[in-house]
């Protein structure tokens, strides 16, 4: 009976998804086609389709490329308060000029409160990355068969959820930068009772609070719940999340040596924006290795050569990253096609023409990575995953894909990219990461675009790190 019910449920889900996909495609087909390069009045563009925002959230790449093919790289939508989406160089340049002002957004630029480059922060960040990854190595591993039928006997401690695991690593590597104190001092304060009034007595409890908040706020519940955001079924499906936002704000403010309220809210916003955008890029890179095994082999060979002669505990610093140009190209191509976030929207101070479109004063303009990063004139065969485009004598221009002003080469974006690459390499150096190549993880979600929260990886620690961890075999 249970088996038939589950099969019926998944049949219903499949039918629902197919119907939604067909409806979306039908809506796209009936849209009025407009010629490129023709000046259009905003009134003629206003509104878009009623399903614009839902279609964008479902598949932003498909939505943006389909609309851009019909209307060019500036077009109006009904999404996000009636925003005009744009990806031209002229649109991106508005963020640095006087013709528009930044609007409030869900995210801020990563690491917006520090002007220190990766070189200055590398040693401390890598030390915390290594220590946290080291703690992921199970203390025990199976030697023989099972002697009991306890449920715990069948749990494989090497199976980890990708996104929460990367989040835990970056929580440790990033929070000291946000709060302005070393991790050891942060841990000492928590264990010493600094957060006792909030009923937090360990860093583990503090991270659990943040993890719940991030799952809820990041917009990617994953799993069965994500398929039924408005379930008609007579029961509720668990959607990861919750967390006490005010409690978390107070905790961060206390650790930073300040009070609660606005300061805590600002600290949480900075921490979330930095950890989640950096983590999204690292996770998307890991997922991309399963979809592109040819590049996976090239990265393995390059990492082996670049790290030769460096002890296993050595940090992945600027010199090591500079010795891995293919890694950088792989990161940029992942950022191009799977950007973690969107730049801040702009409000036009005066009427102007953009891409042949007349925009009125007060127009909400959204610089859009899924348009800017897929322009054929900048990226030939734009939908093909090809990191080699960034390895040529005249490499392709850097993509956009982080929150904050839509500016290439911003300091926070550079720091986040370097930290994501270091995390990616350190994880692969310490573990044999086995992702499912048959059903690869596909990024999704808004405002953070990354792999689903429930995506799994089998992380088998390399023998050197097992010996350092003093791993013992189970005896039955």
Image (spheres, rainbow, N blue to C red):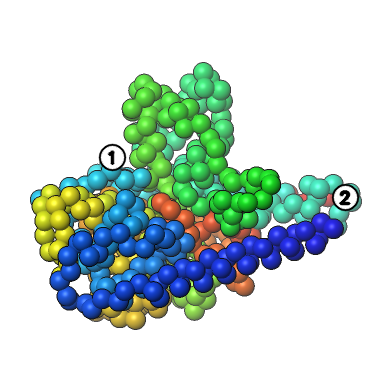
Q: Furthest-top residue in view?
A: 197
Which residue was labeled with disc 2? 149
- Hey, which quadrant is residue 48 in on the image? bottom left
| Residue 230 visible here | yes
Q: Are marks 2 and 1 in contact (CB under 8 Å)?
A: no
Mark 2 element type: loop
- 239 displayed left or right of 266: right
Q: In which quarter of the image is the N terminus?
A: bottom right
- On the image, the x and y values in percent for residue 268 come to 39, 36
Q: Going 40% across and 78% down the picture, which residue do you hit?
A: 384
Observer-nearest of 12 and 265:
12
Residue visible at 35% across and 56% down in the picture = 79
Instruction: From the top left corner, tell me how far across and down residue 206 is, in percent.
Output: 52, 33
Please tell me how crowded label 1 is: few (under 14), some (14-19), or many (20+) other residues with Cα within 10 Å: some
Seen as rendered, the residue at the extreme bottom is 381
Badge count: 2
Q: State whether residue 295 is above or below residue 420.
A: below
Sooner in the amino-acid sequence: mark 2 or mark 1: 1
Relative to 357, is 383 on the left or the right? right
Q: In terms of depth relative to the viewer, which is nearer, 249 or 49? A: 49
Residue 298 image position (x, y, % from top left):
46, 76
Question: Is residue 160 visible from the viewing direction of this image?
Answer: no
Is label 1 in a helix, a strand or a loop? loop
Q: How crowded is mark 2: few (under 14 residues within 10 Å), some or many (20 or more)?
A: few
Name the residue at 33% across, 27% down.
262
Q: Distance between the residues labelled 2 and 1?
A: 52 Å
Which residue, given by chain and number where applicable, does mark 1 sit on? 113
Residue at x-position 39% and y-position 59%: 50
Residue 345, percent from left and from top? 26, 51
């Amino acid at each position: 009976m249970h088996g038939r019910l589950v099969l019926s449920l998944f049949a219903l889900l499949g039918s629902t998804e197919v119907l939604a996909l067909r409806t979306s495609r039908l809506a796209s087909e009936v849209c009025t086609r407009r010629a490129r390069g023709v000046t259009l009045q905003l009134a003629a563009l206003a509104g878009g389709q009623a399903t614009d925002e839902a279609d964008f959230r479902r598949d932003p790449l498909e939505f943006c490329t389909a609309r851009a093919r019909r209307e060019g790289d500036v077009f109006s939508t009904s999404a996000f308060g009636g925003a005009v989406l744009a990806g031209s160089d002229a649109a991106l340049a508005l963020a640095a000029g006087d013709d528009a002002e930044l609007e409030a957004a869900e995210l801020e630029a990563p690491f917006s409160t520090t002007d220190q480059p990766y070189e200055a922060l590398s040693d401390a960040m890598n030390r915390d990355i290594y220590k946290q990854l080291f703690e992921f190595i199970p203390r025990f591993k199976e030697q023989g068969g099972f002697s009991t039928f306890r449920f715990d006997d069948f749990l494989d401690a090497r199976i980890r959820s990708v996104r929460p695991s990367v989040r835990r690593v970056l929580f440790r590597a990033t929070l000291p930068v946000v709060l302005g104190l070393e991790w050891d001092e942060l841990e000492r304060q928590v264990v010493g009772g600094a957060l006792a009034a909030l009923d937090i007595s360990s860093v583990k409890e503090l991270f659990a609070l943040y993890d719940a908040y991030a799952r809820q706020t990041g917009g990617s519940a994953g799993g069965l719940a994500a398929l039924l955001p408005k379930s008609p079924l007579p029961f509720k499906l668990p959607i990861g999340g919750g967390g006490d936002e005010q409690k978390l704000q107070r905790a961060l403010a206390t650790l930073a040596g300040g009070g609660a309220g606005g300061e805590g809210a600002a600290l949480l916003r900075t921490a979330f924006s930095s950890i989640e955008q950096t983590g999204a890029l690292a996770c998307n890179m890991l997922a991309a290795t399963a979809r592109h095994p040819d590049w996976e082999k090239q990265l393995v060979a390059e990492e082996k050569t670049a790290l030769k002669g460096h002890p296993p505990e050595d940090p992945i610093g600027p010199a090591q990253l500079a010795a891995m140009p293919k890694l950088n190209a792989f990161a940029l191509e992942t950022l191009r096609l799977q950007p973690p976030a969107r730049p801040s929207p702009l409000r036009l101070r005066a009427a102007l023409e953009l891409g042949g479109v007349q925009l009125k004063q007060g127009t909400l303009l959204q610089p859009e990575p899924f348009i800017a990063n897929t322009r054929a004139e900048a990226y030939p065969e734009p939908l093909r995953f090809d990191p080699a485009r960034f390895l040529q004598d005249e490499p392709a221009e850097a993509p956009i894909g982080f929150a904050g002003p839509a500016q290439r080469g911003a300091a926070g974006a550079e720091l986040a990219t370097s930290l994501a690459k270091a995390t990616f390499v350190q994880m692969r150096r310490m573990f044999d990461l086995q992702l499912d190549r048959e059903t690869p993880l596909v990024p999704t979600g808004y405002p953070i675009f990354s792999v689903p929260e429930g995506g799994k990886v089998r992380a088998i620690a390399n023998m050197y790190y097992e010996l350092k961890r003093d791993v013992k075999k189970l005896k039955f």
